[in-house]
Image (tube, rainbow, N blue to C red):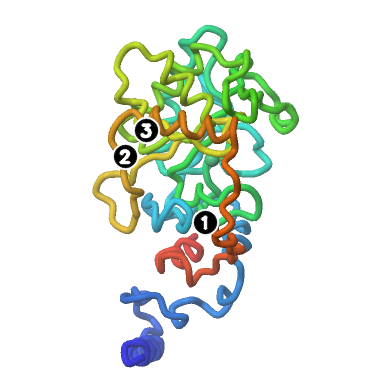
Amino acid sequence: MGGYLRLSVLVMALAGCVQSAPEPKPTGTLSSQSIPASMRGVQAKQLFGAHGHGSAQSPAPLGGYAKGCIAGATTLPETGPTWQAMRLSRNRNWGHPETIDMIKTLSRKAAAQPGWSGLYVGDISQPRGGPMISGHRSHQMGLDADIWLRPADNLSLSRTQREDISSISMRRANGAYTNSSWTRAHHEIVKAAAQDPRTARIFIFPGAKVKMCNDEKGDRAWLRKVRPWYGHHYHFHVRLNCPDNVSGCQPQAVPPPGDGCAEAQTWVRNILNPPPPDPNAPKPKPRRELTMQDLPRQCVAVLQAQ
Ligand SMILES: [Zn+2]
């Protein structure tokens, strides 16, 4: 309480003496005082959803993958030599420059696969990151990207076509196995994504992970980054590490050692033979909507920047 009061007094004192001086940079923990009245009690997804372009700041992911924002995001151009961004109406082709570069690099490798001219790229982040009105819980700091599993065999899709066409599901038996659409090219593209040193994790359905575990006869180190997850049979999700030399970006713990193939096998067994529900399992808590109070203090400045 004492700290809170002291900070309030400090903020009031600063507010009273900076008519022409540059904006004071607030320090310390986030108090409601440092959040402008117009942002208090408002769902953060509404505030972030209202921005059509990135902030004029140097690039910085701030916070965590599911509770953060991004300063200075750039766009993946809507069409490039080896990619197309999909669902342009969502305006989610914004990310950290390393993410954009990683996607471009991966798309060149994809273009070398038979039947692929490059990649169809799904959601990255909103122009300033943050929570979204619809869809993801993560993708908040410009370091997550969804890559369609549908082979990108036509890179001259119109805007309308990019709204209308769908990706293709690769799963069979609820994700326990891949279906006949899965090819070695998928394996090679996921492998290339995992082998990028910037990649922290890849999320894909359990059957795909097990398939890649079985098919990989060479180096298996990359499999460690490929994590089985719910959904993710129309696209796979690439999550990048926090870039070097940034502060304020909270990394996720590294995946457990090993290739993770036994764990993926357990997921598959549980899909095929679901264990009986645990009567003592805690009821899932309804998810609370995030407000600016939940996000790093710097995200207020990201929203306020030009
Ligand atoms: Zn995703």
Amino acid type, callout 1: Gly
How many labels, in total? 3
Which dot, 3 or 1, sits closer to the camera?
3
The residue singled out by tag 1 in the image is: 130
Question: Which image quarter has ligand 1?
Answer: top right
The residue singled out by tag 2 in the image is: 256
- Residue sitting at x 55%, y 60%: 280
* Towards the viewer: 115 or 222: 222
Which dot, 3 or 2, sits closer to the camera?
2
The residue singled out by tag 3 in the image is: 225
Give residue 121's position: percent from left, percent from top. 56, 30
- Residue sitting at x 35%, y 77%: 24
Which dot, 2 or 1, sits closer to the camera?
2
The Cα–Cα distance between marks 3 and 2, rounded to whole angstroms, is 9 Å
- Residue sitting at x 34%, y 31%: 224
What residue occupies the far left of the structure in this picture? 245
